[in-house]
Every structure is written in structure tokens, then in C-alpha cells.
Image (spheres, rainbow, N blue to C red):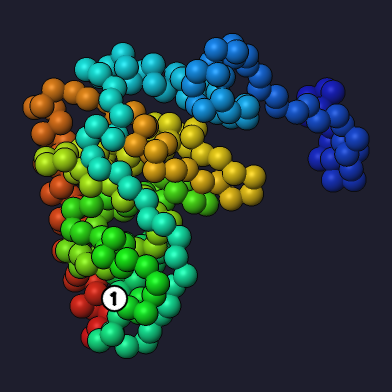
Amino acid sequence: MSKGKPHLREVRRGALADAPVQPQVASWSVTADEITEGKGTRLDAGSYEPGLTETLDELAAGAKELVPLGDLAHVSLGKWFERVFTDDPEHGVPYCNPTDLLNLMAFGVPQAIRYLSPATNTDIDRLLIREGWLLLTCSGSVSRVFYVGQRLHGWVATHDIVRIVPHDGLTGYIYAWLTTPQAKKHIAGHQHGGVVQHITEEQVAESLVPRFSATVEGRINKVVMRALKDRERAIETLVSAWEI
């Protein structure tokens, strides 16, 4: 046993219980202009974390350009409404929230099938989701991304999820970007809220996307769309197995 190191028995008896704990503290500085000209005059330190800037700098160095997501897709968010559900599928529209989407992607079926009644005081058509759209969580666990496949076409999604309708030929590319750690960190830098974190549709639309040549983006889009379609077929097989 090397000299000076505590014996295991001493540690177990709490001999090191009073040893001082050195906290890990990170600090950085920002200018007044950075606060007043960017991020909506936010005062929370996390919004100016150096890692966020470094991520964008790295992207800018390797990409052709950085453009707002809103230039590549239509981004929208529904308005709050009081939900009225029905057990009768003949008189309702299948409804899903982020938890349901997680179950649908993992097991092929939602945790519990619910149907939104036409008696709900809202414009249900504006809440319908379509095949090829992307959905991004904007409350609680921010920036989870879901692809709307054929089996979810025509469902109603909760108002509290951002709808992203990519321009033609960009669905797979945008999905690939939004699922990267860099994109999630970039989007999370916009979140706000004391207990439950939120982001707005405007903040999602303003988040930056790296652009590359049409050839590179086309290859990425093709590969990702093939993978998404393959996953949809696999989930359909899983659903059939559940029904046996």
C-alpha cells in the first residue's frame, strides 16, 4: 500500500467524510451588446454558454452557409384548447401527444388510443398532421423529433408540439440535422421557463441549419428517407404481431 493513501477501512468508517468538496464552477462573460442585440435580451447565463457559440462556429466553418429553419420549412404551433375525448372511433379522430409518439415509435401502438371528439371547441383541421411532416417537442423534454409516417396521417396531434413542414426534397435532410446533438444543443439554448422548459415556434423557425451542396444534401436526404420508410415498415410488422 502506498504511503499517504487512506486505508479502505478508514474510508468506510467515514474518515474522509469531512473532506472538502471542490465545486465545479464554469464562468464566462458577455458584452452588453450580446444581451441587447441577441436572444431577446435574455439574462439567464445558460443562453450564453460558450459551447453554443462554439457549435455554431464549427458548423459555419464546415458548411456552405447557416440559414434559419424557417427558410427551409413552414413552422407552426397550435393554440391551446380544452380537449373533449370520445371512446367511439366512428365519432372521433385519433389523438396523440409526445408520450404517445414515443410509444408509437418504439412499440407501434400508443399507450392508450384516444379519440378527439368533434364537440371539442377548436378547429380540428388545423391540428391534423400529415405524412412527411416533422414534429418537435417544445415543452418539458425540448427538441425531440418525430417523423409522421403514413399510419399517423390524418391524426390529431396536441397543440403543444411544433409542426415542421419541410420544402420538397429536404425532409430527410432536416430530420437528420434536427436529431444531431449539435442541433439539440442549439435549439435548447432558446428554451425558457422556471420549472417546465418551453420554446416557441418563432424560436424553432429561427434556429440555424447548415447548408451544403445540393449533391451532399440530396444524398443525406435519400439515405435518411429510406431509413425512415424502412422503420415504418418494421413498425407495421410489429403492429401486426401485437394483433395476433
Q: Nearer the viewer, residue 107 or 92?
A: 92
User: Can I make out residue 96 in this image?
Assistant: no
Per the image, label 1 sits on a secondary structure element best described as strand
Q: Nearer the viewer, residue 179 or 162?
A: 162
Residue 167 image point, x, y percent: 16, 40
The residue at the point 23 percent across, 52 percent down is 133
Q: Is residue 164 above or below residue 205?
A: below
The residue at the point 60 percent across, 13 percent down is 32
- Quarter of the rendering containing residue 70: top left
Residue 220 image point, x, y percent: 16, 36
**Image label count:** 1
Q: Nearer the viewer, residue 59 or 131?
A: 131
Viewed as shown, does residue 4 lie left or right of 135? right
Viewed as shown, does residue 57 lie left or right of 20? left
Q: Is residue 219 above or below residue 106?
A: above
- Quarter of the rendering containing residue 223: top left
Residue 16 image point, x, y percent: 87, 36
Image quarter of the N terminus: top right
Question: What crowding class fits label 1: few (fewer than 14 Cα within 10 Å), some (14-19), or many (20 or more)?
Answer: many
Image quarter of the C terminus: bottom left
The residue at the point 25 percent across, 18 percent down is 65
Viewed as shown, does residue 139 lie left or right of 204? right
The residue at the point 36 percent across, 32 percent down is 206
User: Can I make out residue 55 in this image?
Assistant: yes
Residue type indicated by callout 1: Val
Q: Is residue 40 above or below residue 132?
A: above
Residue 142 image point, x, y percent: 46, 46
Name the residue tied to disc 1: 93
- Quarter of the rendering containing residue 57: top left
